[in-house]
Image (cartoon, helix red, strand yellow):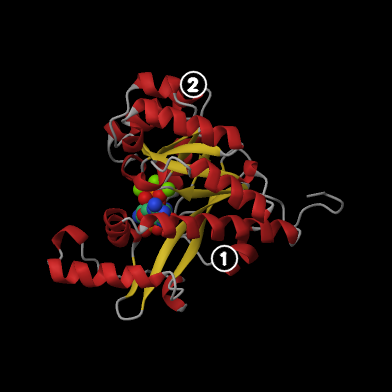
Amino acid sequence: HNAKEQGVEIRRYIPAMQMKAKERLKLENDLRRALERDEFYLLYQPKVQLETEEIVGMEALLRWNHPKRGIVSPNEFIPLAEDSGLIVPIGEWVLKTACLQNKQWQLAGYQPICVSINLSMRQFLQPNLAGKIHSILTDIGLDPCYVDLEITESMTLDKETAFDQLKRLKELGVFISIDDFGTGYSSLHYLKNMPIDRLKIDRSFVSEVMEDSNNAAIVSTITSMAHHLKLKVTAEGVENKEQLQFLREQHCHEAQGFLFSKPIQAAEFETSFLKKAPLGASL
Ligand code: C2E
Ligand code: MG
Ligand code: MG
Ligand code: MG
């Protein structure tokens, strides 16, 4: 991969919905071959604990290096992968790659941190998902406490299915976060009852938090609700110090965003953000 990812990502953004059927089919065929051609890779974005300013985690974010189009955004190809069912093998590749990377960093003597992995709807609805994740973790030898799975509110609309699935995942010992929180349709009733660990406040609220008093009210309400429900709360899309200061005042636990770092390659993440574990720390 090249300099593109270091700075601004250059992407030719064509929403899948607006693409001509023929083009869509072509992209879907390319997607079908992308795994065997090794065209996917993961970037990592640090998650910072606000009280200590320490890096406590990272989110794995998928990229597709298309031979002709260049780097394709997940917003563009995840919906295609979801429609075609390709998301299942692709999602498994993401799980394996992110867990293996995390284990390799631990073996290299770095202080262990948690990796957050995004799940898609189809993946989440697989009845044997917990079994699959269990075997990935045991094959790699990664402690489940270093894995956090991100789902969205829309995946929990079928309450019973979601509850059973989340319970199975929680029994593995992994963490569960609700991504893009505030943009879906979750009821407070479901929040009270679902076995989850964390809310991630959607970037749309955080980005305008200093300009829009309604956004400030929403961020502050979600944060305080999370505290009362004994959930962790992470703000996404933090881009400036004013936003960070506001989040600190609200006692938001963690934050991610360009203020700290864009999503970056594993090698850069390692040199910029990982710390060596104290000598004698056992794995
Ligand atoms: P997400 O999980 O909500 O990830 C956050 C997105 O916001 C990422 O976009 C990240 O690059 C971007 N971001 C982070 N900080 C900032 C900031 O300060 N400002 C701005 N403007 N943007 C920021 P990205 O990497 O393009 O991913 C978009 C979405 O694609 C993700 O949203 C997630 O829903 C999905 N996605 C990414 N990787 C995967 C994956 O492995 N599997 C699945 N199923 N979905 C994925
Ligand atoms: Mg996410
Ligand atoms: Mg998000
Ligand atoms: Mg998002």
Local crowd size for mark 1, using a 10 Å CA cut-off: few (<14), some (14–19), many (≥20): some
Residue drawn 27% across the image and 37% down it: 212
Q: Indicate whether 238 appears above or below 273.
A: above
> What's the residue at 71%, 56% (across, down)?
106
Asked if residue 275 can be seen in this view, the reply is: no
Mark 2 and mark 1 lie on one chain; the one further toward the N terminus is 2
- Circle 2: element type: loop
Tell me the residue at 41%/65% (across/down).
Answer: 63
Q: Picture coordinates of residue 203 (x, y %)? A: 36, 45
Badge 1 element: helix
Instruction: Say whether residue 36 is left or right of residue 68.
Output: right
x and y, in percent, of residue 218 in the image = 33, 30
Q: Where is residue 238 in the image (x, y as percent from the top left)?
A: 43, 48
**Residue receiving disc 1:** 266
Q: Which of 13 and 55 is in front in this view?
A: 13
Q: Residue at x 21, y 68 (%)?
A: 25
Contact flag, marks 2 and 1 (Cβ < 8 Å): no
State which quadrant residue 103 falls in: bottom right
Which residue type does callout 2 highlight?
Answer: Leu
Residue 279, image x, y percentages: 85, 54
Residue 204 seen in the figure: yes
Residue 143 vs 215, above or below: the answer is below
Instruction: State yes or no: Cβ of the residue under disc 2 lies below 8 Å from any atom of ligand 3.
Output: no
In the current view of this chain or complex, which residue is farthest to the right? 280
Residue 12's tag is none
Q: Which amino acid does label 1 sit on?
A: Ala
C-alpha gap between disc 2 and disc 1: 34 Å
Label 2 crowd bin: few (<14), some (14–19), many (20+), radius 10 Å? few
Residue marked by disc 2:
229
